[in-house]
């Protein structure tokens, strides 16, 4: 018995060592606690911390030291010295401000601030010497991102040694509670030399006067550029309430190249220049601000208050370090005559929703919690749209829509309830016999399609909710749904466009002449798609297979204008505005643009809705030669599908997800079941659910973002997560969703959360691991005692050896006294050994080892002699 106790003590010490050596993975975050500085609770920026980010990088908080402005339109300034003497480079900015308190912020670099006070009224000035604008923010703008290898140079022999922050507090009603404001910006700096030096070019009107009630007033700025080449990568526009649109251009050899165009009533961020623009010696930089004096009773001048106006066009650029100039301005109109040729887009206001206007101008008359909550939710939604585009799309394999009995699927749409609407051809087929050489339909004798061609399905289970369109169409093609839930469709055989009510059997509006192709104002030739502007009600038709144009009609169907022409194949690459089958339309109401899938040119072309002016082209090698369809999701995502690769080409048929602002491909996707044959249309919802209709496979695929599918699979499997694991998961998720920030308060809160979770997890795990071996050993003791007194008799015939090896051997079932379930239960009254004895293998096909023993019984003890 003494030997047994010794063995138990040894095992216990081993387990204790294991437990004491256990370290929670979360405990590694404990080291951050030592580097986190103590911050005052009232204002996080009052001690102006410097945070090390590595051997050569550091972060610097430039934050107002807890100020409370006393009146509206207050400009307050504060300064922070560069914490190092040698040269450094600013490579990133992170703003900390809200439109509820701040109208806009400017960050200057200089060598001598205007005051040495903690903060001061900016009427005293910002800097005593020359100052350079490094950064500008207004109205909840997202942070500026500098390209890799580009930085603002500060310190050393040529850079500024102080940062001066200027904050404009417009409406101070938010300070009725006398709280203190700590708005500002965090800079990411590095000592590593940057090969390209960033700078700011400010174009500013100084003498514009806006008469009261005047509908349109232009403020023009233009300067000749007389320096080394610079490369433009970001722009920002700024006006006050009367500004409608601000545009900036490079003019070279009378050719106008757009730098950027934006509504100043939208979040005034530094937006990326969509297409790289370089500026060389003697180019002209030109900008125009469009104002409206409607609603004003007096003249409005350029000035510093919210009731004045401003016309600013900021350009961020970079130059080679040896030629770099950090700040340049243009405040004149050196060549007024050139503005006669300014692109028409510069004169067209960008529509902004009323709720965005209210948010942008910081209206404080609504002080209820519900109002503030809605603003916060809207801001979060907009930020999510801008930033959270990192996802992967995969087929929703549980979707039963592949088994629907459909004809050729030509069009898809989503209604107001996000139900899937399918437009298909029933038993009609478009083949080589459908049209003659003049595009006249040759199978009229078949009559119209006798099946319902418009199907409304539940997007989750493909259950049919509604159907219509019987005996109306010959060869359906395009489909869209307007804001009033009307269906708009095209028929390539009829050469017509129809508007249908949800439950109407006859069209509400018909455009084109039945079965008559043409190219004038009243005829179409195989029209492919149709969309309706939700703001103006204007109708846009892509026409089509045998015409190469986009036609605009008024809301009641009157011809307005058209644009586009055929592609001249002899000239090689198609020019802007040329089409080879404009096949699909995507309306971009957020930007007043219309994007066209230019099918046979394998590209997307985008145009201004009001004028048809070409804006840009999106084309990628992975599109191949054909791009069939395009769809836009509010928030900045484009979805598209391409066509079959030509012989000898390798680009596969696939779906694409793109960032609308940049045109970059975010993701591609293909089906898991079956394969694409000829995907013809695509539609997507804001939750990134995508449907693709295949005209040849006669089916509809459903795709969803990977995160969404993973959530469903976990829910379906019914996985239960233990409390300890759940704690780790929660902490890990929070850390992933809140990446390491230079904001000290956020770091402190995150470290406190991790420390608490780490302590709780470690305590639970260590306690559990200490208890488990003790319980197991206690059970062994009880079992051994019971076996000695009952199973083997009280005379100790089978005494236990003191060797720990024999103890463990008996636990494995080896030796004469091994554990046998049959004996265990048989020793109790009322239990039978039946079912526990070794099975006979005579005549069976059970595999045996070389020694003739059954493989399943190799490690089992032979059955003991029957007990009396």
Image (spheres, helix red, strand yellow):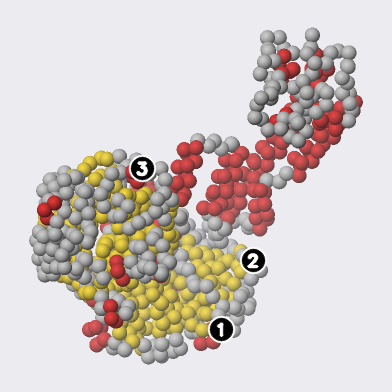
Can residue 636 be seen by looking at this rendering?
Answer: no
Q: Nearer the viewer, residue 473 or 164?
A: 473
**Front: mark 1 or 2:** 2
Give the label on residue 158, or none: 1
**Residue carrying label 3:** 400
Q: Residue at x 33, y 87 (%)?
A: 252
State the image coordinates of residue 564 (x, y, percent, origin top left). 22, 73
Q: Residue at x 26, y 86 (%)?
A: 338
Q: How crowded is the residue under tag 1: few (<14 C-alpha within 10 Å), some, or many (20+)?
A: few
| Quadrant location, the C terminus | top right
State the image coordinates of residue 508 (x, y, percent, origin top left). 11, 52
State the image coordinates of residue 593 (x, y, percent, origin top left). 27, 66
**Residue carrying label 2:** 54
**Front: mark 1 or 3:** 3
Seen in the picture, residue 382 relative to 759 is either above or below; the reply is: below
Q: Earlier in the sequence, mark 1 or mark 2?
A: 2
Seen in the picture, residue 717 relative to 251 is either above or below; the reply is: above
Identify the secondary structure beneath mark 1. Answer: loop
Give the Cα separation between the discs numbered 1 and 2: 25 Å
Identify the secondary structure beneath mark 2. Answer: loop
Seen in the picture, residue 525 relative to 692 is either above or below; the reply is: below
Give the Cα separation between the discs numbered 2 and 3: 53 Å
Give the label on residue 787, or none: none
User: Quick check: marks 1 and 2 in contact, CB under 8 Å?
Assistant: no
């Amino acid at each position: 018995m003494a030997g047994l106790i010794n063995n138990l003590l040894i095992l216990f010490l081993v387990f204790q060592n294991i437990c004491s050596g256990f370290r929670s993975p979360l405990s590694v975050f404990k080291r951050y606690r030592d580097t986190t500085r103590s911050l005052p609770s009232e204002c996080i920026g009052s001690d102006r911390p410097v945070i090390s980010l590595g051997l050569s990088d550091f972060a610097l908080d430039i934050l107002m030291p807890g100020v409370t402005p006393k009146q509206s339109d207050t400009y307050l300034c504060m300064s922070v010295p560069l914490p190092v003497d040698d040269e450094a480079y600013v490579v990133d900015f992170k703003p900390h401000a809200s439109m509820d308190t701040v109208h806009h912020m400017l960050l200057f670099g200089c060598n001598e601030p205007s005051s040495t006070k903690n903060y001061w009224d900016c009427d005293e000035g910002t800097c005593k010497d020359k100052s350079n604008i490094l950064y500008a923010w207004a109205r909840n703008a997202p942070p500026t991102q500098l390209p890799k290898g580009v930085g603002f140079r500060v310190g050393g022999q040529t850079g500024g040694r102080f940062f001066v922050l200027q904050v404009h507090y417009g409406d101070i009603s938010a300070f009725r509670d006398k709280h203190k404001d700590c708005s500002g910006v965090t800079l990411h700096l590095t000592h590593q030399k940057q090969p390209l030096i960033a700078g700011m070019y400010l174009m500013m009107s100084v003498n514009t006067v806006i008469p009261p009630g005047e509908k349109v007033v232009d403020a023009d700025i233009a300067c000749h550029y007389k320096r080394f080449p610079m490369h433009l990568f970001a722009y920002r526009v700024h006006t006050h309430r009367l500004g409608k649109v601000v545009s900036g251009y490079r003019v070279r050899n009378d050719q106008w190249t757009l730098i950027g165009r934006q509504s100043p009533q939208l979040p005034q961020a530094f937006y990326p220049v969509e297409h790289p623009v370089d500026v060389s010696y003697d180019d002209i930089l030109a900008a125009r601000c469009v104002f409206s004096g409607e609603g004003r009773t007096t003249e409005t001048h350029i000035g510093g208050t919210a009731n004045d106006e401003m016309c600013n066009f900021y350009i961020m650029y970079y130059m080679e370090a040896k030629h770099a100039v950090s700040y340049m301005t243009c405040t004149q109109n050196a060549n007024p005559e050139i503005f006669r040729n300014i692109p028409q887009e510069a004169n067209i206001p960008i529509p902004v929703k009323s709720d965005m206007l209210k948010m942008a101008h910081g209206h404080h008359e609504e002080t209820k919690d519900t109002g503030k909550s809605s603003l916060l939710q809207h801001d979060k939604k907009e930020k999510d749209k801008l930033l959270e585009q990192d996802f992967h799309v995969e087929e929703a394999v549980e979707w039963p829509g592949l088994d629907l009995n459909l004809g050729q699927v030509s069009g898809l749409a989503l209604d107001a309830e996000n139900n899937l609407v399918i437009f298909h051809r029933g038993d009609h087929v478009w083949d080589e016999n459908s049209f003659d050489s003049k595009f006249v339909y040759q199978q009229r004798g078949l009559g119209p399609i006798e099946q319902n061609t418009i199907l409304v399905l539940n997007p989750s289970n493909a259950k049919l909710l509604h159907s219509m369109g019987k005996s109306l169409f010959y060869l359906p093609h395009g489909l869209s749904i307007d804001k009033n839930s009307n269906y708009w469709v095209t028929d390539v055989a009829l050469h017509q466009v129809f508007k249908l009510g949800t439950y109407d059997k006859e069209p509400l509006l018909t455009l084109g002449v039945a079965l008559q192709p043409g190219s004038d104002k009243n005829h179409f030739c195989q029209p492919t798609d149709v969309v309706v502007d939700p703001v103006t009600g204007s109708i846009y038709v892509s026409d089509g297979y045998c015409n190469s144009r986009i036609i605009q009609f008024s809301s009641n169907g009157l011809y307005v204008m058209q644009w586009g022409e055929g592609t001249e194949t002899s000239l090689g690459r198609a020019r802007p505005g040329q089409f080879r089958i404009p096949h699909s339309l995507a309306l971009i109401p957020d930007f007043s643009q219309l994007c066209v899938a230019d099918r046979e040119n394998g590209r997307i072309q985008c145009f201004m809705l009001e004028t048809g002016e070409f804006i840009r082209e999106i084309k990628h090698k992975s599109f191949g030669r054909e791009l069939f369809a395009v769809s836009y999701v509010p928030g900045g995502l484009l979805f598209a599908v391409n066509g079959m690769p030509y012989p000898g080409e390798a680009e596969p048929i696939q779906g694409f997800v793109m960032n609308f602002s940049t045109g970059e491909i975010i993701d591609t996707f293909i089906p898991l079941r079956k394969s694409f044959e000829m995907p013809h249309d695509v539609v997507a919802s804001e939750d990134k659910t995508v449907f693709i209709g295949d005209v040849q496979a006669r089916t509809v695929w459903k795709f969803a973002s990977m995160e969404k599918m993973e959530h469903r699979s976990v829910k379906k499997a019914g996985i239960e997560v233990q409390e300890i694991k759940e704690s780790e998961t929660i902490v890990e998720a929070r850390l992933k969703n809140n990446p390491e920030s230079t904001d000290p308060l956020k770091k402190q809160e995150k470290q406190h959360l991790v420390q608490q979770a780490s302590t709780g997890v470690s305590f639970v795990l260590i306690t559990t691991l200490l208890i488990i071996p003790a319980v197991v050993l206690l059970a062994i003791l009880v079992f051994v005692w019971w076996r000695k007194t009952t199973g083997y008799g009280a005379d100790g015939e089978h005494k236990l050896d003191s060797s720990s090896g024999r103890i463990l051997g008996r636990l494995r079932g080896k030796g004469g006294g091994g554990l046998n379930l049959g004996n265990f239960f048989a020793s109790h009254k009322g239990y039978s050994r039946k079912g526990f004895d070794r099975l006979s293998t005579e005549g069976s096909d059970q595999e045996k080892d070389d020694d003739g023993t059954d493989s399943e019984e190799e490690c089992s003890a032979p059955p003991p002699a029957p007990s009396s």
